[in-house]
Image (spheres, rainbow, N blue to C red):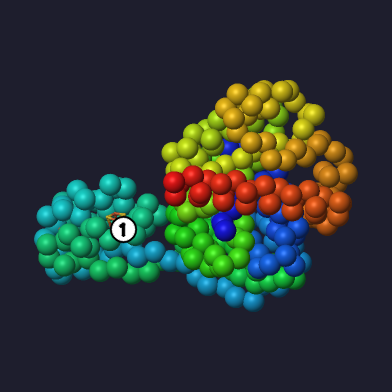
């Protein structure tokens, strides 16, 4: 089963939930934590990790053979990302904008474009006790998070439980992370900002047809808007984590909630069991 952990906005406690869920499930079957927040992976800070493998991630970008090029302009016309342009007797390439789709080299009538690999990040993997772990790191200055995310997700062992820590927001990298998930936990905080971004995240889940539920973090800090919205929209609130100085202290020291306050392990395990029930029920309905 694949459970992703996402949030409409940053700083809501997504890492806290993902790492504590993973820690609470260890020794209860195979569990894997994939940190797909590739611009800022930080789950590793909370786990006692041994990274033993590192693999570069690259995408194919076009290289022009000037001897063959007739400057017909076709490549510039087909590139929707404006990563290649033809100006007179020059073909300009902008590798940072290239998505590596291959359309330009495929459609070049003179076969003047070849593809060369360009490194954009790295995937690191290892073990934290019995938790299998992998994370992506996008090279600073690069913009193409999805290829790195895909490479992290390729490590998913779907025979066990896979927890995917997604980036915040609702843009392409988030969609790349959560698609294919059996369930998505949306972590939010009880504030007007949290509510606004939760609504965007819910709309994304609906569009992708992914089951979802909400975890409210720092409960007691804001207002009742998020709870009222969830009740009105019939969205399950799976867990409420209070605003608590001790939890904040643990987090700032890089200690998971499930380890710093072991009584929370059962709470996170109940969260997991509730998710399993929701997924089973949904699958049953889809078969009918
Ligand atoms: S499509 Fe090929 S031949 Fe035409 S300008 Fe681009 S590289 Fe040159
Ligand atoms: S590979 Fe795709 S994105 Fe890159 S320059 Fe060619 S058409 Fe544009």
Residue 172 seen in render:
no
Above/below status of 65 relative to 176: below
- Residue at 78% x, 29% y: name it: 221
Left or right of 113, for residue 43: right
Tell how many labels: 1
Residue 85 seen in render:
yes
Mark 1, other Cα within 10 Å: few <14 / some 14–19 / many ≥20 = some
Q: Quarter of the image holding residue 226?
A: top right
Ligand 2's image quarter is bottom left
Above/below status of 251 relative to 186: below
Q: Quadrant of the N terminus?
A: bottom right
Q: Front-most of 128 and 285?
A: 285
> Which SS class for mark 1?
loop
- Residue at 15% x, 63% y: name it: 69
Left or right of 70, for residue 40: right
Q: Give how far across and how far down residue 74 sits, in percent.
A: 16, 53
Q: Give how far across and how far down residue 28 sits, in percent.
A: 72, 65
Q: Give how far across and how far down residue 286 sits, in percent.
A: 45, 46
Above/below status of 86 relative to 206: below
Left or right of 18, for residue 168: left
- Residue at 51% x, 62% y: name it: 153
- Residue at 39% x, 64% y: name it: 59
Q: Quarter of the image holding residue 193?
A: top right
Q: Give how far across and how far down residue 269 sits, in percent.
A: 74, 53
What residue did someone put label 1 on?
Answer: 101
Q: Front-most of 138 and 50?
A: 50
Q: Residue furthest front?
A: 288
Above/below status of 181 relative to 234: below
Query: Is the CB–ligand 2 distance for label 1 below 8 Å?
Result: yes
């Amino acid at each position: 089963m694949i459970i992703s952990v996402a949030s409409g906005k940053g700083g809501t406690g997504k890492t806290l939930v993902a790492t504590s869920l993973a820690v609470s499930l260890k020794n209860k079957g195979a569990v894997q934590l994939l940190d797909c927040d590739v611009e800022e992976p930080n789950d590793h800070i909370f786990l006692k990790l041994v990274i033993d493998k590192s693999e570069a991630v690259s995408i194919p970008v076009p290289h022009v053979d000037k001897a063959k090029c007739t400057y017909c302009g076709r490549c510039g016309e087909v590139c929707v990302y404006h990563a290649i342009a033809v100006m007179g007797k020059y073909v300009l390439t902008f590798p940072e904008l290239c998505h590596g789709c291959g359309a330009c080299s495929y459609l070049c009538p003179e076969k003047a474009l070849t593809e060369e690999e360009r490194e954009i990040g790295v995937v690191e993997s290892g073990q934290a006790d019995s938790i299998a772990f992998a994370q992506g790191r996008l090279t600073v200055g690069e913009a193409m998070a999805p290829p790195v995310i895909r490479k992290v997700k390729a490590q998913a062992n779907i025979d066990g439980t896979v927890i995917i820590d997604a980036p915040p927001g609702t843009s392409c990298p988030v969609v790349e992370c959560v698609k294919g998930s059996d369930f998505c936990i949306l972590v939010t905080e009880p504030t007007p900002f949290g509510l606004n971004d939760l609504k965007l995240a819910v709309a994304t889940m609906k569009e992708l047809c992914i089951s979802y539920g909400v975890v409210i973090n720092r409960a007691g800090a804001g207002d009742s808007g998020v709870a009222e919205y969830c009740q009105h929209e019939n969205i399950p609130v799976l867990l409420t984590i209070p605003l608590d100085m001790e939890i904040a202290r643990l987090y700032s020291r890089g200690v998971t909630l499930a380890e710093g306050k072991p009584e929370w392990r059962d709470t996170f395990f109940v969260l997991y069991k509730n998710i399993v029930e929701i997924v089973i029920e949904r699958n049953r309905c889809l078969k009918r």
